[in-house]
């Protein structure tokens, strides 16, 4: 049985005790819900891969209550310090070289000599991290390849019975995962667009190399970058300017009529509102579309600036050919 813990002092204390005991606990952050485990406990970290049914050991993000704790495990250079100062707590993950005395499980790094660190901007997550007193490894709390969860109920829908508890900290405010930047080499590389915009990051440390123009080897440094991901069960059609009756429509701005089902991410074309609504909307259209016997989810065009970068990245992967 998976315990549903209230987001109060009692729930946080219980969640921290479970984590220290090597159990898996999902918790909300400002981006998406994470599936947490004590990052210093190999067996607990291995449990994350089993619960998510991740086919491979993709590296995981370690969560910390403040930058000093993160930089005690990963080696921070000058850009890392500047980004931490400006954007933490917040939806930014930095890939750094592991310190020689780092106590984080090697499984978290999946064989790489780097690790990903982040300080989330969420009061309950920070309270949980402080109370646990250890780095917490947490990928998104969904089964591998599925849409990321933005409510406690989404987590239960996918992982009930497979994990010890979910801390119900309310719906996630940002709604897409953190931006991942690799700062372990000579020049910073954008590995995954996310909740911290490229514009905001470049204003602090200058131009980023984009993974798209980086070497294939760079892309492979972040295994979560490739292939079908964030996928609903129904096929996804992008850049739809019209819609058929046998399609569900993911709208943005003024939407055409005639769809079999519809969710509008933001009639006002507000990208922040759209990001926060994205994953819940995909889940709803997928469930409703399948119930009504619809053929696919059509998605209206969404601009690529600001949070639109992360939204379009997730939608492209949702639409990518699926592994069989
Ligand atoms: O917003 C988020 O980042 C959420 C919340 C829970 O914090 N977490 C999350 O984790 O999205 P996950 O496991 O779904 O995505 C982690 C990403 C993957 O693309 C992974 O390949 C990359 O970070 N990553 C982790 N460690 C890495 C490393 N050492 N080198 C390169 N990429 C790394
Ligand atoms: Mg994920």
Image: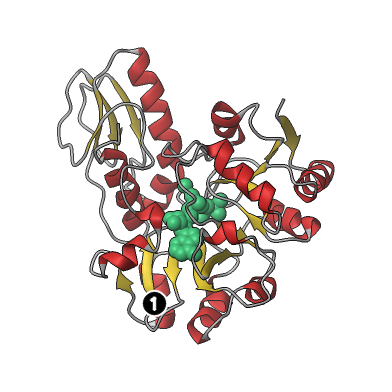
Look at the image and name its color scheme. secondary structure
Q: Looking at the image, can residue 174 be seen?
A: no
Q: Tell which residue pokes out farthest to the top in this image.
A: 292
The number of discs equals 1
Crowding near the residue tagged with mark 1, few <14, some 14–19, many ≥20 C-alpha atoms within 10 Å: many
Residue with the mark numbered 1 = 188
* Residue 249 position by quadrant: top left
Q: Give the percent coordinates (x, y) of residue 147.
A: 43, 38
Q: Is residue 86 left or right of residue 73?
A: left
Indicate the secondary structure of the residue bearing disc 1: loop
* Residue 18 position by quadrant: top right
Q: Give the percent coordinates (x, y) of residue 94.
A: 50, 69
Q: Give the percent coordinates (x, y) of residue 52.
A: 53, 38
- Which residue lies at the image location 34% right of the left edge and 17% below the top edge? 290
Depth check, front residue: 282 or 18: 18
User: Where the N terminus falls, by quadrant?
Assistant: top right
User: Where the C terminus falls, by quadrant?
Assistant: top left
- Which residue lies at the image location 26% right of the left edge and 69% below the top edge? 215
- Which residue lies at the image location 68% right of the left edge and 42% below the top edge? 24
- Which residue lies at the image location 69% right of the left edge and 61% below the top edge? 135
The image shows residue 83, relative to residue 138, as above or below, that is below
Disc 1 CB within 8 Å of nearest ligand 1 atom: no
Q: Give the percent coordinates (x, y) of residue 261.
A: 31, 22
* Residue 84 position by quadrant: bottom right
Depth check, front residue: 308 or 234: 234
Q: Looking at the image, can residue 189 be seen?
A: yes
The image shows residue 284, relative to residue 19, as above or below, that is above
């Amino acid at each position: 049985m998976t315990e549903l813990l209230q987001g109060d002092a009692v729930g946080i204390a219980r969640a921290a005790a479970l984590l220290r005991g090597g159990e898996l606990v999902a918790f909300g952050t400002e981006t998406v819900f994470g599936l947490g485990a004590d990052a210093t406990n190999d067996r607990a970290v291995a449990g994350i891969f089993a619960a998510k049914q991740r086919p491979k050991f993709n590296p995981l993000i370690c969560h910390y209550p403040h930058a000093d704790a993160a930089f005690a495990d990963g080696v921070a250079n000058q850009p890392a310090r500047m980004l931490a100062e400006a954007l933490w707590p917040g939806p930014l993950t930095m890939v750094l070289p592991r310190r020689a005395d780092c106590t984080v499980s090697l499984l978290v790094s999946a064989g790489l000599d780097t690790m990903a660190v982040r300080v989330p901007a969420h009061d309950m997550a920070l309270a949980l991290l402080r109370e646990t007193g250890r780095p917490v490894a947490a990928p998104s709390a969904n089964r591998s390849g599925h849409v990321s969860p933005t409510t406690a109920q989404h987590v239960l829908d996918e992982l009930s019975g497979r994990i010890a508890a979910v801390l119900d900290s309310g719906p996630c405010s940002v709604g897409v995962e953190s931006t991942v930047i690799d700062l372990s080499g000579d020049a910073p590389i954008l590995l995954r667009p996310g909740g911290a915009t490229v514009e905001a990051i470049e204003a602090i440390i200058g131009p980023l190399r984009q993974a798209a123009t980086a070497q294939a080897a760079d892309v492979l440094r972040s295994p979560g970058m490739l292939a079908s991901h964030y996928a609903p069960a129904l096929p996804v059609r992008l850049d739809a300017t019209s819609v058929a009756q046998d399609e569900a429509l993911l709208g943005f701005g003024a939407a055409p009529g005639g769809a079999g089902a519809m969710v509008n991410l933001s009639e006002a074309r507000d990208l922040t509102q759209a990001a926060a609504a994205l994953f819940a909307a995909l889940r709803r259209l997928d469930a409703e579309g399948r119930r009504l016997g619809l053929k696919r989810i059509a998605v209206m065009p969404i601009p690529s600036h600001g949070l639109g970068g992360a939204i379009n990245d997730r939608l492209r992967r949702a639409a990518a050919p699926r592994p069989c």
